[in-house]
Image (cartoon, rainbow, N blue to C red):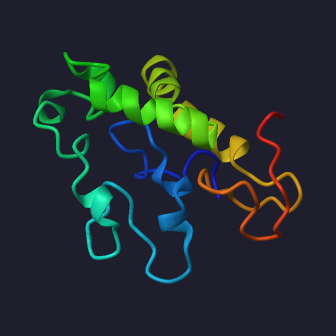
Amino acid sequence: MDKGFKYQGMIAPCGMNCGLCIGHLREEKPCGGCYGREDKNKPETCRSCSIVNCEFLETTESGFCYDCDKYPCVRLKSLDKRYRAKYHMSMLENLGRINNNGLLAFLTMEDSRWNCLNCGSGLSVHRNICINCKSKIDWEV
């Protein structure tokens, strides 16, 4: 697989890489991500997400929150704070990387950042173990 294309189409307006979500990685009825065409496998919290459904998002050129006049809004800052604390990932940092370096560079970085050092499988941001080999993930590395 070409570098940078594993997660293409899976980056949400808030900067979340939906390809890292446990809902997308589950074997049965995987979620298609924020931009997935079918909502049937999406959790209700994702379907009703105030960021994906934000009326200001339609006015952005890029489709990402960093282009919004309200950036960063209260909802995005709250989501970022929760993900930094619980999952060692920042939506605001992701959006900054996309804005500064482009989506392809961000996708390439994601391909290398989110792979298990033990078996090489893709990791979930929502788990502290590899879902393939069960190795514990040291987020401080």
> In terms of depth relative to the viewer, which is nearer, 139 or 29?
139
The N terminus is located in which quarter?
Answer: bottom right
Displayed quadrant of residue 20 = bottom right
Relative placement, left or right, of 31 versus 88 is left
The image shows residue 128, relative to residue 58, as above or below, that is: below
- Image point (42%, 45%), residue name: 11
Which picture quadrant has residue 52? top left
Residue 103: percent from left, percent from top: 46, 33
Residue at the outermost bottom position: 28
The residue drawn where x is 34% and y is 66% is 43
> Number of numbered discs present?
0
Identify the image quadrant of the C terminus: top right
Question: Nearest the camera: 82 or 57?
Answer: 82
Decide which of 121, 28 is in the foreground and name it: 28
Does residue 17 appear left or right of residue 51 in this picture? right
- Residue 97 image position (x, y, % from top left): 52, 23
**Res. 89 in view:** no
**Residue sitting at 38 percent across and 66 percent down?**
32
Residue 12: x and y in percent read: 37, 44
In this orientation, does residue 122 appear?
Answer: yes
Q: Is residue 73 above or below residue 21?
A: above
Residue 27 at x, y percent in the picture: 56, 80
